[in-house]
Structures are given as structure tokens and as C-alpha cells.
Amino acid sequence: MTESLLDDLQTSVAEAIAAVTDAADIDALADIERSSLGKKGFVVSAKKAVGTLDPELRKSTGQAINEAKVQLDEAIAARRSELGRSARSAQYEGERMDLTEVPAGASVGHAHIVTQTWDVLEDLFVGMGFRVVEGPHIETDWHNFDALNIPKGHPARDGFDTMYVNHGEPGSTLLRTHTSPVQIRTMLDQEPPIYVIAPGRVFRRDTADSTHMPVFHQIEGLVIDRNISLADLAGTIDAFVTAYFGAEVKSRLRPNYFPFTEPSAEFDIQRSDGSWLEMGGCGMVHPNVLRAGGIDPEEWSGFAFGFGIDRLALMKYGVDDLRDMFANDQRFLAQF
Ligand code: DAH
């Protein structure tokens, strides 16, 4: 009796395991599970039959049945996860989309002219050995002004129509009025030599007109190394103007005043009609600014420059009114 019970069970388990391995899908697997381990399955019937055995055989037979059940359970679980995996990959395959596919004749759009100009500037300066860095739009008053040698009460502060942010001490936090605070962040962040540019968005309390926007873009340059002179600054500006506008366009430096540079200059470029156009500011980094950035002015010197990206885009694409660039009118944008 015991012999045949265990023999039958073993045969049934072997058959069931073979069927499990062959099960084509989750439903087929569930059928096998039901007929083997379910209420009317052979494992349950075998367990019931144990009660009819001689008492001394019950324990070992019961154990053999449990082992068979465990074996079957494991085979089913393994096949279930295998089927699940292939069902999922079939689903993923079916849901895959070719995002590079563009319907014939569709308009794909293009980068905004400010973005195009920004990209060209980055490429150009990276080609000259500069690294691109970024700073936050919301700045501290210290990074935006004090550290740049513009202490509280300094008249240069009036030149920046600053938008303050309601955070911390009144007047301590603002929307950066220029990209120059990134100079300070970079100096505090890394050891010289430093060769970086920092393009980004800046904010001023300005009314929009043909040449002003309350939100616009600047690019800042900072070089700190040993024995950097005004000649290096002039050479860099000249190399940049030639690369951006072409060899026929000349540049010049004109003395000016900025609190964060000494000496300071405005740099201009010459248009085809011979007239000069103001491009941006530059100069030798003021010792106070180096010190604020944790750099010893006895050992290191440097130059900085900053100019408007929007202004450059305006010139390059012959746009008359700055406001047109930000009105998001497709008829305007599609021209470039
Ligand atoms: N931050 C100045 C502005 O927004 C521009 C500028 C002038 C940047 C001279 C510089 C610089 O780095 O050296 O008006």
C-alpha cells in the first residue's frame, strides 16, 4: 500500500514538473497548480491516504509527501517568475516608441536665437580653454554686491535696479542683477588657476522697451593665474570678437569704471559703417574682490569681463526690438 502510494506520487510529481517546465503561460501554470496542489489535487489525496497507513509508516510517508510538495512549489514559483519576466519584456518591446521618428513634413522647431547664441558662445570659449560654470538666480546681497567691492551705500548699487526677495533679513537676498557673483562663487570653490565663463539669466527692475527687459542673459568671464596682465585681457577679447564676428570686425577697449575691476574698461566692436558699438565691461580683477574670493592678490592676478547675450543675438540676427525675442510669436521665431 505505502509502496504504491509513494510510487504513484513520485510519478505524478515528475509529470507535473515536466508540465510546469513546458507551461506556455501563466494560465496553463495555474491549471497545473490546481490539479496538483489544489483541494482535489494528488498531493491532498496522498495526504488523506496517509491516515489509512500503519501508524509506524505514517511519519516517513508524510515527510515524503511534504518534500514532494516543496519540490513542486519551487518548480511552479520558478516558472511563474520566468513567464512574468518574458511577459514584461514582450510588453516593453510592444510599448517601445521611436522618439527620433519624425513624420514627413512635420515642423520640428529649433532652439531660440538666445539659446543658439548662448551655445555658440560656450563652444567658442570652451575652444579657448575656458570651463563653463553656473550660479544661482537667487543670490545673497553679499555675493551680488559686497564681495564685488560694492559695499552698502556705494553709489554703484543705484545703477542696478535690484529686485529683492522676501527671505531672511530684509535686503539680504535678491534676484542676481548680473552674472558677476559667479566670479565669487568660483573663486571660493576652486583654487587658481581659474579659466571660466558663466552664462546665465539676470534680473533687473526695468520696464520692457526695445533695448531693455527685466529678465535678460549675460555671460561672465573670469581668468585668475600668475602674471595675468591687461594685455591678456585685450588679447582674449580680440580673439573672441574675431571668432564670433569674423576677422574684419575690430574691437577696442575704452576706459570706464566698475567697482570690481581696476583698471576697468568698456569693450566696443566696430560695425561695417565704421561706428562703434558698446558690447560689455571688463577689467583687471580688483584686489578686494580676489580677497573676498579667498585668493591672495600678491600671488595671483586676473581679468574679468561680462556682456549681454541677448544684445549679441539682436545684432547677429538684425532684430530691431528686444521685446520681439520674448513675445513667443511663431511668425517671428520661425525666421531664424
Ligand atoms: N557686471 C557688469 C554689469 O552687469 C558687467 C561687467 C563689467 C562684468 C566688468 C565684468 C567686468 O566682469 O569686469 O554691468
Image (cartoon, rainbow, N blue to C red):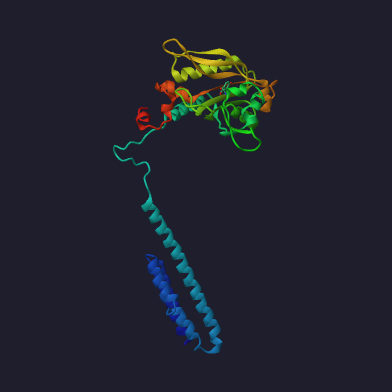
Q: Residue at x 48, y 84 (%)?
A: 48
Residue at image coords 36%, 32%: 330
Most distant residue in the front direction: 207
**Viewer-closest of 137 and 2:** 137
Tell me where residue 99 sits by quadrant.
top left
Residue at left offset 43%, top offset 76%: 36
Q: Is residue 260 above or below residue 248?
A: below
- Residue in the image at 41% along x and 62% along y: 83
State ligand 1's quadrant: top right
Work out which residue is located at the far top of the displayed protein and give it.
274
Which corner quadrant of the image does residue 106 belong to? top left
| Residue 272 image point, x, y percent | 42, 12
Q: Give the tally of numbered discs.
A: 0
Relative image position of residue 63 (x, y in whole percent): 54, 79
Q: Residue furthest left?
A: 105
**Image position, residue 49 (x, y; %):** 47, 85
Front residue of this view, candidates 217 and 323: 323
**Side of 162 relative to 323 (left or right):** right
